[in-house]
Amino acid sequence: MLRLAPRSAPSRALTLAAPFVALALTIAVGAVLFLALGHPPGRALALFFLEPLRGGDGWSELAVKATPLALVALGLAVCFRANVWNIGAEGQFIAGAMAASWVAMRATESSHAYLMLPAISLAGLLGGGAWAALVAVLRDRWNASEILVSLMLVYVAEMLLGYLAYGPWKDPEGYNFPQTITFLPVTQVPLLAEGHRAHVGLFVALGLAAVAYLFLFRTYAGFQLAVGGQAPRAARYAGFSARRSLWTALLGSGVLAGWAGALEVTGPLGQLTPHLPVGYGFTGIIVAFVGRLHPFGILLASLLMSVLYIGGELAQSRLGLPQALSGVFQGLLLFTLLACDALASYRILRVPAQRAGAAAVPS
Amino acid sequence: MLAASVSAGTVLALAGLGLLLNERAGVLNLGAEGMMLVGALAGYAAALHLPAGLTIVAYLAAALAGAAMAALFGALAIGIGTNQYATGLALSLFGVGFSAFVGAGFVDRQLPERARDGLPWLRDLPVLGTALFGYHPLVYGTLLLAGGIAWFLFRSRAGLLLRAVGESPESAHALGHPVRAIRLGAVMFGGALCGLAGAYVSLAYTHLWVENLIAGRGWIALALTTFATWRPARIVLGAYLFGGLTMLQFHLQQRGVQIESHLLGMLPYLATVVVLVLISRRAAWIRHNMPASLGRVFRPGT
C-alpha cells in the first residue's frame, strides 16, 4: 500500500528537475505512440524534436511561433499566480488581431510606418484588453466564473472573426475567399533578417518578460497579487484589494494576448483570415505551467512548445501524421509536469499492509 | 423543432448529470470537453467495426473510454493531489489533441443508415406521437438516469455519503470512509456519462466524426452544473432549454431570417454567459448550494 506524505520543504532539486523529467517522460510515451503506429520511433522523434532546430530558417520559424506563445503565457502567469483562471486567452488573441486589422486596413500609400505600427499595436492591446475586461466585469460585478466566461468568449470571438472575414471585411477582389485585403507593406512588422519570417515581436516578448519579472517580484502590487492568489484570507487581513488583483491579472493577460494577436496578423500573416487562431491561447496555458509561472522559465518553455508545433507540421508533411499530434504531446507534457510537481512537495511512502489499516484511523 | 431541441439537450443533460455527480463529491473536472471527444470517437470507431444491431456495444465502449480518461484525471488530481483546475485543463487539451490524432482516419467514413428512432406503433400516434415516443432510447435513458441520480443523492445512504465527501472530506475521513476511493468512483462515473454523451453526438446526432466535434458542449455542460445549483432535475431542464437555443439558430436560418450564420452561432455561448451571470449574481445562494469542498485537494493525514 502506498501513501503520500508531505515533505518538510519542497525538494529543490525535484522542483527544478520537474520540467526535464516531464519532457523525458513525454518523449518516452511519444516513442511508444510512434511504435504503436508503426513508425520507427527514433526517426519520428528526431523529426519532432531535432529537425525544427536545424538551420537559420528553422530558428526563424521557432521565433515566429515562440513570440506569441511567450506573450500569451507571460500574461497568463500573472493571472494564475493571482489564482484567476483566465483560460480564454485564445479569444483575447483573436480580439486583438481583429482590432489591429481594423487599423491596418485603414493604411494608405502615404501612411508612415512610425505612426502605423504603434497604432496597430495599440489597437491590439485595446482589443485584447477589452475582451478580457468583459470577463473581469462579469466576475467582479456579478460573480460569474471567469473560467467559463473567458472560455465562452473564445467561441464568440471565433464566430465574430468568421462573420467579419466572410462578410463586411471580405476583400472585394479576393475571389470570394473569406479573407481581408492583404495589408499594405507599411503595416508590416519589421523583420529581423531579410528572407526570414522572424520579426521584432521577439524583442517585444523578451522585453515584456523582463517587465513581468520586475512586476511580479520587485513591486508591491505584484506582491499583493501573489499573496491574494496563494492565501486569500491573509491578503484580506492585510487589506490587499482582491478586486484590484482580479482586474490587474485579467487586463494584463488580455492586453498581452491581444498584442500577440496584433503582431501575428500584421507579421507572418499579413491579412486577417478565419485560419488565424491555431491554439496559441490554449498552448500558452501549458507554456505558463511548464515555465513554472516564471517569466524567464516561460521564455524557455515557449521555445520548447514551438519546437513541438513545428515538429507536428513536419510530421504531417513528411510522415503523413495528423498535426494534432503536437496537441497530444502538449497535453502529455502538462500531465507529467503536474505529476512531477506534486511529487516535489510530497513523497510516496510504502506502508506495510497491516499498518495501512491503522494509518487510515485518524490520530 | 421540439424533437431537435430535446435531442440537442440530451447531450448536455447526460454530460451535465455525470459532472454533477463528481462535483457533488467535491471534484471539479474541467476535462469534460476532452472526455466527450474521446468518448465520441471511441463510440464512432466501435460502431464502424460492429454490425448494426450491436450499437449498444459502441455506446458501452464510449462510456469506458470516458471513464478511462476520468481515471487518468483521478490518478493525478485525487491520487497524488495535483491542482484540479490545471489537471482538468490538461485533460481537455490532451483529449482534443488525442481524438483529432487518432480520429484522422475516420473523418471520411460514413456510418450506415440507422433505423428510425422511437417506439414502434406508439410513435405513429397522431398529434403527440413523435413528440413523446419518437426519440432515441438514450433520451428516455437520460430522464430515467436523472431520476435515479436524484434518488441516489437525496434518498440513499450511499448518496448521503457521497455528498458528505463533497461537503467535508475531513469529517468523512474521520468517520473512516475512504474519501479518495469515493471521489475516484464519482469521477469515473462522470467520465463514463461524458463519454456516453460524446457518443450520442457522433452516433445519433451528427452521424459523422470530425475534428473537434463536440465544439464546446463539454464546457457548456460544466456551466450547466452551476446553473442547476447542483440539482439533477434542473440540469435536465436547463439542458433542454439550451438545446432549444442551439436549435433556434438553425430554425431561424431555415425560415430565411436575414442574420448572418456566424452571428447566430454565437447564441448558445452568449446565452451561457448571460445565464451564468444571472445565476451567479446571488453569491450567497451559490455558496449555499455549492459542495463546500469543490475544487479543493484532499490529502488524508495532513
Image (cartoon, helix red, strand yellow):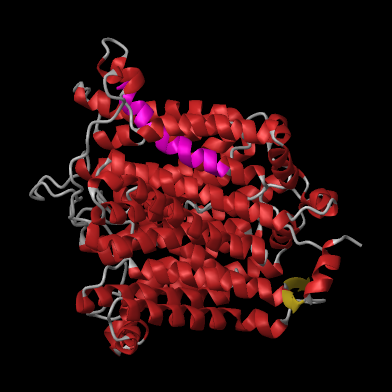
Q: Nearer the viewer, residue B64 or A308?
A: B64
Question: Residue A55: in sight, yes or no?
Answer: yes
Q: Residue at x 31, y 34 (%)?
A: B263
Q: Quadrant of residue A260?
A: bottom left
Quadrant of the image containing the C terminus of chain A: bottom right
Instruction: Locate residue A7 relative to residue B49 in the image: left or right.
Output: right
User: Overall secondary structure of the magenta stretch?
Assistant: helix
Relative to A7, is A111 above or below? above
Judging depth in this view, the residue of B177 and A310 nearest the camera is B177
Quarter containing the N terminus of chain A: bottom right
Name the residue furthest right.
A363
What is the quadrant of residue A353 in the picture? bottom right
- The picture places residue A183, in percent across and down from the top left corner, at 22, 57
Q: Position of residue A148 (x, y in %)?
A: 52, 44
Q: Determine the residue positioned at 49% across, 35% down.
A: B273
Height in image: B290 above or below B28?
Answer: above
Task: Identify the residue at horizontal 50%, vertical 54% (top origin).
Answer: B31
In the image, A329 versus A98, the foreground residue is A329
Whole-percent x, y for residue A242 in the image: 71, 48
Tell whether position B76 is magenta.
no
The residues colored magenta run B1-19
Residue B229 seen in render: no
